[in-house]
Image: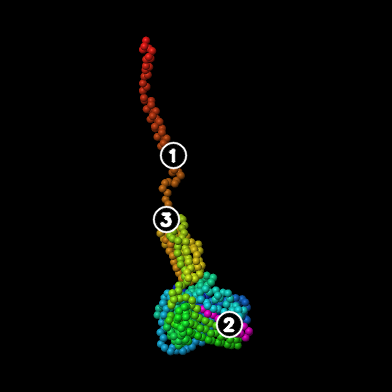
Amino acid sequence: MTALSTVTAEVAIINPRGMVEQSTKGFLWNAIGIHNEALLQHSLNRGIASGPATMQSSKWSFSTLVLALVLASLIVAPSILPARAATYTPALTSGQWAEYKLLASTCLPSSSPECQAQGSGGMSNTDYGLLKIAGVSGTNVTIDLSTAYTNGSNVAMQGWVDVASGSSSLVGLAGGTPSNYFILAGNLQATDGIWNTISAPTINQTIAETALGQSREVNILNYTHAVSNSYGSFNTSTQFTFDRASGILFEFSNSASTSSIYGGSSQTLTTFGMVANNIWRSDTLPDFTISNSGSIAVQAGSSGTSTLTLSDQYGFGSTINLQVTAQSGLTCTLDKTSVRGSGTATLSCTGQPGSYTVTITATSGPSTHTTQVPVQINPAATPNQPTSQSNLIYIGIGVAAAVAIAALASFLLLRRKKEASPTAPTETPPSATATQA
């Protein structure tokens, strides 16, 4: 039997380092299998048998709900052989990307257990999703997938898909052929299998329509599925729309209804689609920039700073995480380790004398940018004269003694010269009166 993911199931994701990560969040990207009959049983009975606590604990994220609907619609796939010899090679290239947003989401009645299970933490809290082509090798395409939420948080992962076999590290149906509905081979058309396998679903029709303001040929893949048992019924209708030339998913729409013998019923409609790309348009990817106010130059023992400025671009508003890397001999810290959208952070550095380069790495989802700050630590200043108080005292005494000795010597010398000088006799000149007599 084919399986669908529960709300609480986690998906093994292989990260770029080859390590397995677990995640239940993302924009359409996560899925694992449980039996469809179990999903039906869960859908029909959960709201009656379980209490509010159960509904609260099983709130659906955007990706979980969408993927549950997607996989529910893929239970029975047509097994029609391709009518022509299609070529199953990627038409996308590294660096291309597409941005997706939720276009419509309704669930009625809002008081039903299924609608309550979505809660406020569901799809309405998703800002946008990004699919970026990280690399292409043969029929294998490596993709970066990320989701930005309205609260500023984001989730990112990397995986691969094979456009020939349909294999994927991101999405799979337990017990059957792995399923990949993000990227198909380029230039397929109606009656072609979406993969080059006997059991691959076939494209229902190829039509021309306006896609993001331009006329494009698109491939339509439709599913309808119904299940009923003694507890009630489950009906779903799903439509995938792919851009024909590139093979990338353009739009997804799913409607589903459930009814229970206990009187409960619900109807849901979910549509999300591409809102920007650089494949046949020249849109700009939501991103951010980072810069610094300049180099740092201080003396050893002091701390210098540089201001980091982060700016959002083209609707980017997620949280940016900051990390600083400094060379040996230098210690640097940040006054904050994250900034949402736009803002500033202060880098402070101190260390041993020398020339350094500090690297600040800013990461948000799949986007990573760096900035480098030169740091110069100069030796502490050396005083030009003695600073010892005792030395100054000795120098003062010496100078005073020298002055005193010099003064005494001068005094004695002058006195000796005065005593050695003779006294000349004094003569009284004759008076004028005596001479006249």
User: In the image, residue 172 lies at what x, y percent?
Assistant: 49, 81
Looking at the rendered image, the disc whose residue lies closer to the viewer, 1 or 3, is 3
Q: Position of residue 43 (x, y in %)?
A: 58, 82
**Residue at 51%, 74% in the rendered image:** 128
Which residue occupies the foreground of this view, 115 or 9? 115
Residue 91, given in percent of the width and then of the height, sits at 41, 80
Residue 7 magenta-highlighted: no
Q: Are marks 1 and 3 in contact (CB under 8 Å)?
A: no
Q: Secondary structure at mark 1?
A: helix
- Taking the image as shown, residue 404 lies to the left or right of residue 155, namely left
* Secondary structure under the numbered disc 2 in the rendered image: strand
Q: Residue under circle 1?
A: 397
Residue of label 2: 267
Q: Which residues are magenta?
A: 257-272
Main secondary structure type of the part rendered in magenta:
strand
Is the C terminus in the top left, top right, bottom left or bottom right quadrant? top left
- The reply to whether residue 168 is visible in this rendering is no
